[in-house]
Image (tube, rainbow, N blue to C red):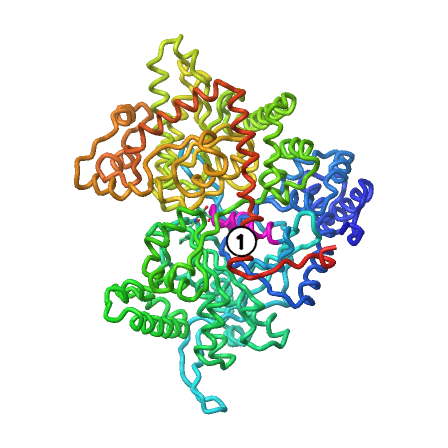
Amino acid sequence: AWRKHSAQGFTTKEQFEDEAVRHIETTLARSLFNCDELAAYSGTALAFRDRLVIEWNRTQQRQSFADQKRVYYLSLEFLMGRAMDNAMLNVGMKDAARAGLNELGFNMEDVISQEHDAALGNGGLGRLAACFLDSMATMNFPAWGYGLRYRYGIFKQEIVDGFQVEVPDYWLDFNPWEFPRHDVTVDIQFYGYVSRKTDENGKSVAVWEGGEIVDAVAFDVPIPGYGTPTTNNLRLWSSQASKGEFDFQKFNSGNYEGSVADQQRAETISAVLYPNENFETGKELRLKQQYFWCAASLFDIVRRFKKGKKAWSTFPENVAIQLNDTHPTLAIVELQRILVDLEGLGWDEAWNIVINTFGYTNHTVMPEALEKWSVPLMQNLLPRHLQIVYEVNARFLQMVEKKFPKDRDLLTRVSIIEETQPKMVRMAHLATIGSHKVNGVAELHSDLIRTTIFKDFVTIYGPDKFTNVTNGITPRRWLHQANPRLSELIASKLGGYDFLTDLTKLNKLETFLDDKAFKKEWQEIKYANKVRLAQYIQKTTGVSVNPKALFDIQVKRIHEYKRQQLNILGVIHRYLTIKAMSPEERKKLAPRVSIFGGKAAPGYWMAKTIIHLVCAVGEVVNKDKDVGDLLKVVYVEDYNVSKAEILTPASDISEHISTAGTEASGTSNMKFVLNGGLVIGTCDGANIEITREIGDSNIFLFGNLAEDVEDLRHAHHYGSFQLDPDLAKVFSAIKSGTFGDAGRFAALCDSITDHGDYYLVSDDFASYIQTHGLIDEAFKDQDAWLEKCITSVSRMGFFSSDRCIDQYAEEIWNAEPLPPDGGA
Ligand code: 26V
């Protein structure tokens, strides 16, 4: 019904061609005679953008007029991937565009793949933010994302001679999906000093003076919802030298070089995404990024609130701010500063507003990932904020002391300040104290944070402040876009595409388990997706893989806790087993392709060693005539969102094998199952809830449980460490040089045999190998396998990010959707 309101832009193939050509010739000033695929992409993108922008403006107007609570999602990462296919899906008219492009001599898929991924994120946390934006727009929530406009996103990964090489990702050359708003600029202050002055009422107020000013310039990205005209906004801040008086002084005094240097220093703030995941380094530039982005976003949010001329006490009824991990925790301090120092509210009144405004999502329990900032660093960069942190802490500790008198250990444990040398500000404590809700991202993870890192806070605040919202994924991108044929087949059975906005509708698929034609088509689609991946692998790595083989995929950031090393050691075990088999025995084995992909943080040496081992094993195995098709090992270079769209629909099995208790949730596990693949996994993160939903006969679980991990680690150190005998054989193969220079892998082997095997690779090895044996057996019965896949897909409704957003809105934000035309 809404489309009648959006008659702007093209509605036919001919009009699309006119529009695209007009953009190519005028907006881009290019001749049609040498129009390449990139120009075709640009013209198509601009034609669709026109349609998008109209609804975007309408949505923003509607949201301004409606007197309704707004939601702000603060995230340092938004891993959006490509925008055009998503825009076509949501705006409609993809078929007209496809036909139009064909007439112009282009193929839609090739044109789509011209677009550079927007890769402003590391992994799960950034992709979750992108899925949430999609769901919030689709469900008509008045919601904005706030982030940083990095000039360089996550680095591009090249594999050179089996080693990772990082190449900068400069992605802004041509980006039709962002709109610079040079009129929306905020002055951001750093350094300086704090003095106290008396205001006109005789009240003492803190004044932050001196230091330097950097400008934050807004760049807006439209976020279209699916099946609704609602088009929300993602506002990304870019840093620029201040246009104010500060650097003009230098400029006018003839210090031209100094003024240019200032400019470059300012631009450095939003220059590059930090490529670590789960590892905190404490760099000043990172803290600068965090404050720059929090201060600009808060200024913007407060300015919007003030337009409504409402009492400050109503702020939390009008604004909900969700903190994606502790990275935006300074927003809590900044709001308190604005309310107390700039708006003149009393401390308690202001703090009440702050607490009721913020919610904090925790994404990891790994100690090395918990953010801490040194007090001297913060003192220098943000002197007033440090004062506020101390004041917040003093009042909090007073409250605790009153409730639990004379428990000094408790005070030490929960204090925002860690009494080390130098003192450190614990951001997770600050975020917890400054929010009204704290949530984990899967049931096990939420249980773990309640009993480990936030145990004392549960004692202090009671259990209700801590809750769980299990992660989800958007079915628009991760089913319909990534796997259009499967989506179409499902739609043909369910009588339409309603499942894309109510994923629980998938459960009707189970009634078709006896439908032979349906099952055959399902199988054909999986095969076609595997053929496509096989072609991609052939083209990019030169390795030929048999699409009939079992495709076993592990793609995610490389980290010891995610245990790609367990996977590759298992692959070596398989290789040795095949080598030891007779030709007759080999005939009985199901062929396998082990596919790896993912980036290692540039400074994470062990992760890079794991990548090298995978590549080295591939070099040997893929050439071994004894092995042939029975085993291939492939490393897919530069894993990112658009590659995930090719990989996810092509798996038979995917690996989610983190040491129990370490993976907060995982979201790729959901993507693979939703695309008709099965999972081998540990009892960790969302694997547990996936099992609960799809049934334990449809997943291959193995390994030790989270509750036993601590004891096992303890035993490694104080008992006798027994290396698994099969793993010992694998190590001797590595050490004898089967995969090249053994010295390169010594540290990896030693971390298991000599340094405590922290991630329990040896403890879980036998169970892992045995479970892969079960997978081999199960794959032989293709009919039963298919039934498992279809049953699993039908039960995945729970893992839609729409369900997450519903839950956040209900339990944390207290926010309502704003449907266009009052829901008509
Ligand atoms: C932490 C840090 C620490 C400082 C350096 C830069 C940096 C960048 C990102 C992070 C966040 C790490 C936490 C994270 O990504 N967690 C993942 O969140 C996913 C979404 O909730 C979840 O599915 C994954 O299990 C979890 O690892």
Q: Is residue 467 above or below residue 645?
A: below
Q: Nearer the viewer, residue 165 or 525?
A: 525
Estimate the x, y position of residue 397 in percent, counting from the top left.
32, 71
Look at the numbered disc 1 and give the secondary structure of its residue: helix
Q: Which residue shows up at 71% across the image and 41% down it?
A: 40
User: Eyeballing the image, is 398 above or below 478?
Assistant: below
Question: Would you place residue 338 above or below residue 761 in this image?
Answer: below
Callout 1 amino acid: Gln
Q: Residues within 10 Å of mark 1 (few under 14, many from 20)?
A: some
Which residues lie in the magenta part? 119-136
Q: How many marks?
A: 1
Q: Is residue 635 visible?
A: no
Label 1 CB, ligand 1: below 8 Å? Answer: no
Residue 75 appears in view: yes
* x then y, percent, for residue 426: 35, 62
| Residue 428 location (% of width, % of height) | 38, 60
**Magenta: main secondary structure:** helix
The residue tagged 1 is 807
Q: Is residue 122 magenta?
A: yes
The answer to which image quadrant residue 379 occupies is bottom left
Q: Quadrant of the C terminus?
A: bottom right
In the rendered image, the residue lying farthest to the front is 511
Please tell me which residue is depicted at 31% across the width and 27% down the height of the picture: 766
Q: Residue at x 32, y 53 (%)?
A: 452
Is residue 35 found left or right of 147 in the rendered image? right
